[in-house]
């Protein structure tokens, strides 16, 4: 669904809040998929969200709930009658329970597990062996798999009954479930029906280890030119697969998480989460920012006497800070992306530093001339223009270098550079810019 279409549907839903509008719900169900329905409901205030969710057909309520962000889904679960929840979770499968386990209460989780058949319980237990950032936790446990001794004609009969989404290969295992290889489905057509499937196995088919990071695995699938890759445990046993659709969802989820992290927010935060919860989530980041602001202010305070005598320096300080901040954020964004894609290493760090130093020097000199001329003309002091010009050069160069060092260092410390890199970078550029500007002003203007 396009953004503009979604906004129109939201407006339509909100206009009918006080009406019983089952026909509107049915139209949305028919016209849009589960993902779009989840996004639509997240855009509604909590009371309205619950009301419209209850009007969804029973077959859609659970899938939509599973697709909603944790905070939004939890708000629905808290508001829905307990008896309705018991009915809703009566036929929960393992994959849906994995999606919902973080928002379900312990009693509901235990009840859902108790009602599962042995196959679903085994699948859930298999996923729980791996952390939720590992591909073994999220892989599809129902790939198209046949034993190596199976005849081609038997496999073809199986294909007439079963054809999973994102499937162009049959996975082959031995009698113990150990990975043998994959056979392209198109090779089965025209092949001798009495051949063993193992005789058609494609060599060098890529695979994933169940303990691999889920986002790294998603990138591997997306760049593999395959529709799905097998997921193997440490003993080379096939436990599932990661398909292209799931890989793209994971990449989108990571991108959203990084965007939210730059503001210190959780990607699961609901638009209409309770005021106290939202305030608590954001308070910590505001506190961190406050400490860095006080640190920058302390450095400014060291030049109090200079500011009292040369007021123009105080007027121009925001210009120095702003130019350094923008220059640093440009480099930071580039490096964070490079780290996420695995493009930054010790081998290319030195040439990268050299390149960014030259970019910072070129832009620093260019904008130093522009800002110095404006400041000199404005305050009728070419000495002041020269001081701010020199400070701009120093700050833009230091911002470019910090834009590399800060995220690389955070990555080595196992801290997400997308989460805290911008705050640290802003502090560095502010301090360098203010010290350079006010220090040069003290030396040459007093």
Image (cartoon, helix red, strand yellow):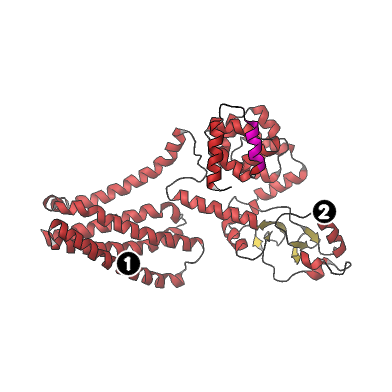
Q: Residue at x 71, y 52 (%)?
A: 141
Image: 224 above or below 253: below
Could you say which quadrant of the image residue 228 lies in?
Answer: bottom right
Task: Please provide percent x and percent y for residue 318.
Answer: 25, 52
103 in magenta: no
Q: Earlier in the sequence, mark 2 or mark 1?
A: 2
Q: Which residue is mark 2?
A: 161
Is residue 25 found inside the magenta-colored segment of the image?
Answer: yes
> Is disc 1 placed on a helix, strand or loop?
helix
* Dot 2 alpha-carbon crowd within 10 angstroms: few under 14, some 14 to 19, many 20 or more: few
- Furthest toward the right, the residue is 194
Question: Tag 2's secondary structure?
Answer: helix
Which residues are the magenta region?
A: 19-30
Res. 65 in view: yes
Say whether residue 359 is left or right of residue 435: right
Pointer 1: what residue? 360
């Amino acid at each position: 669904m396009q953004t503009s279409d979604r906004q129109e549907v939201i407006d339509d839903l909100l206009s009918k809040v006080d009406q019983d509008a089952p026909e509107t719900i049915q139209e949305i169900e028919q016209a849009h998929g589960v993902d779009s329905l989840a996004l639509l409901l997240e855009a509604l205030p909590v009371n309205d969200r619950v009301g419209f969710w209850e009007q969804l057909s029973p077959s859609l309520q659970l899938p939509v709930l599973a697709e909603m962000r944790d905070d939004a889904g939890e708000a629905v679960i808290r508001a829905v009658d307990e008896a309705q929840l018991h009915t809703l979770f009566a036929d929960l499968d393992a994959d849906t329970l994995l999606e919902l386990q973080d928002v379900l209460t312990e009693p509901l989780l235990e009840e859902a597990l108790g009602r599962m058949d042995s196959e679903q319980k085994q699948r859930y237990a298999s996923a729980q062996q791996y952390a939720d950032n590992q591909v073994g936790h999220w892989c599809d446990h129902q790939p198209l798999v046949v034993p190596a001794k199976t005849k081609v004609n038997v496999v073809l009969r199986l294909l007439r009954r079963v054809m999973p989404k994102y499937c162009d290969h049959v996975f082959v295992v031995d009698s113990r479930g150990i990975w043998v290889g994959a056979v392209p489905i198109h090779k089965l057509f025209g092949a001798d029906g009495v051949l063993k499937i193992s005789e058609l196995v494609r060599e060098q088919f890529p695979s994933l280890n169940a303990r691999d990071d889920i986002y790294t695995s998603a990138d591997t699938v997306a760049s593999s030119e395959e529709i799905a890759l097998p997921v193997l445990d440490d003993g080379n046993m096939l436990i599932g697969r990661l398909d292209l659709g799931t890989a793209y969802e994971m990449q989108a989820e990571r991108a959203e998480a990084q965007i939210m992290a730059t503001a210190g927010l959780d990607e699961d935060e609901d638009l209409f989460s309770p005021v106290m919860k939202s305030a608590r989530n954001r308070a910590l980041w505001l506190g961190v920012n406050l400490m860095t602001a006080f640190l920058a202010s302390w450095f400014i305070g060291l030049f109090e006497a200079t500011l009292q005598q040369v007021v123009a320096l105080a007027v121009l300080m925001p210009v120095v800070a702003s130019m350094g901040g923008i220059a640093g954020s440009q480099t930071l964004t580039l490096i964070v992306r490079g780290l996420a894609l695995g493009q930054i290493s010790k081998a290319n760090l030195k040439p990268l530093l050299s390149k960014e130093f030259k970019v910072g020097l070129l832009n620093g000199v260019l904008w130093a001339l522009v800002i110095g001329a404006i400041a000199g003309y404005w305050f009728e002091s070419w000495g002041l223009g020269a001081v701010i010009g020199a400070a701009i050069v120093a700050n833009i160069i230091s911002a470019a270098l910090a834009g590399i060092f800060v995220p690389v260092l955070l990555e080595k410390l196992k801290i997400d550079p997308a989460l805290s890199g911008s705050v640290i970078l802003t502090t560095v550029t502010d301090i360098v810019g203010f010290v350079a500007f006010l220090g040069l002003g003290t030396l040459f203007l007093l």
